[in-house]
């Protein structure tokens, strides 16, 4: 009742947005469509003094990373609310893209951050098809329509085109990090090779602002009476009970593999 009485001082409120898992252009991971309403509520309900991002993500789709981060920044600037990012196990690649939506980034001593790069992975099965006597038949209109088909030998022109796309996306990622971290970034370090840093070393090169956990850091900034309200994507009953269909099972394997790249 206290907070509804106008002449009594209310305790500060920090909205906490949980960003857990891979970033995907499907419903199996973090995406802008799913997170949009969550982020909007976090900035709008209860007049928060700040928004805290609780991040544990190995990355994923660069476009979804950009859309989510842009939404956070747009609301932060429109409402004049500071944003703080707190990294748990990992904020790598797209996960670090999300962390840069924060005005300040805090990590645990064991957190892995960075991996500022872009990757594309595929497979080649044309030799296997030949061994089992299967013939691949593809008909297209447009010479580039079947680019990087895993069932035919690689073409140098296709690889060159793909690498051009990756370089363009990498430049986009670098521009975002520089725009958000600015002079905090260590000038002598090559931060954009896809390398990762652990805990304090990430702070030393300017990818994070300090070692700190969400609740004590926010209480230090806003007072011991600070309240927290948590927001996150809703999980369906089927997801809570476990992967029930092949698509969900595959998504779980892919996400596990993404975390495993960092020994997690």
Image: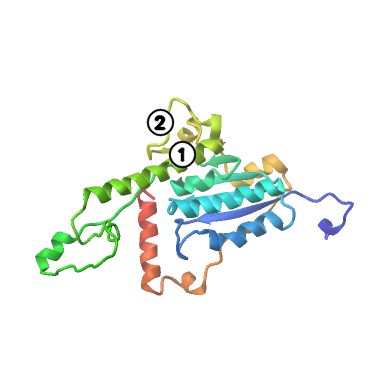
Residue 211, image quadrant: top right
Q: Residues within 10 Å of mark 2 (few under 14, many from 20)?
A: few
The quadrant of the image that shows the N terminus is bottom right
Specify the farthest residue to the right. 7
What residue is shown at x 41% (from left), y 42% (from top)?
Answer: 170
Query: Label 1, on which residue?
Result: 174
Residue 52 in percent (x, y) is at 62, 49
Query: Label 2, on which residue?
Result: 190
Disc 1 to disc 2, C-alpha distance: 11 Å
Q: Is residue 204 above or below residue 106?
A: above
Residue 126 in percent (x, y) is at 17, 60
Q: Which mark is residue 47?
A: none
The mark lying in front, picked from 1 and 2, is: 1
Using the rendered image of the protein, determine whether residue 84 is visible from the camera's viewpoint. Answer: yes
Specify the farthest residue to the top. 188
Q: Residues within 10 Å of mark 1 (few under 14, many from 20)?
A: some
Using the rendered image of the protein, determine whether residue 229 is visible from the camera's viewpoint. Answer: no
As drawn, is 151 to the left or to the right of 183?
A: left
Q: Is residue 205 above or below residue 245?
A: above
What residue is shown at x 54% (from left), y 62% (from top)?
Answer: 33
Along the polypeptide, which appears first: circle 1 or circle 2? 1
Residue 18, image quadrant: bottom right
Q: Secondary structure at mark 2?
A: loop
Residue 129, image quadrant: bottom left
As drawn, is 138 to the left or to the right of 16?
A: left
As drawn, is 84 to the left or to the right of 168?
A: right
Q: Secondary structure at mark 1?
A: helix
């Amino acid at each position: 009742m206290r907070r509804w009485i106008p002449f009594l001082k209310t305790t500060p409120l920090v909205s906490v947005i949980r960003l857990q898992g891979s970033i995907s252009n499907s419903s199996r991971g973090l995406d802008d469509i799913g997170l949009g309403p969550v982020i909007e509520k976090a900035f709008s309900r209860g007049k928060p003094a700040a928004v805290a991002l609780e991040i544990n993500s190995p990355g994923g789709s660069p476009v979804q990373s950009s859309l989510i981060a842009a939404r956070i920044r747009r609301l932060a600037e429109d409402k004049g609310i500071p944003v703080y990012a707190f990294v748990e196990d990992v904020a790598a690649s797209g996960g670090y893209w999300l962390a840069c939506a924060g005005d300040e980034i805090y990590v645990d001593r064991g957190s892995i951050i960075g991996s500022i790069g872009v990757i594309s992975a595929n497979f080649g099965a044309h030799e296997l098809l030949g061994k089992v006597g299967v013939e691949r038949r593809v008909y297209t209109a447009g010479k580039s329509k079947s680019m990087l088909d895993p069932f035919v030998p690689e073409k140098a022109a296709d690889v060159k085109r793909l690498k051009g796309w990756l370089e363009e996306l990498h430049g986009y990622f670098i521009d975002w990090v520089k725009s958000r971290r600015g002079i905090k970034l260590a000038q002598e370090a090559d931060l954009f090779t896809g390398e990762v840093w652990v805990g304090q070393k990430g702070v030393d090169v300017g990818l994070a602002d300090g070692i700190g956990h969400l609740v004590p850091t926010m209480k230090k900034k806003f007072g011991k009476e600070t309240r927290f309200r948590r927001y996150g994507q809703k999980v369906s009953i089927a997801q809570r009970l476990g992967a029930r269909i092949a698509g969900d099972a595959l998504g779980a394997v892919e996400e596990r593999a993404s975390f495993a790249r960092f020994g997690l």
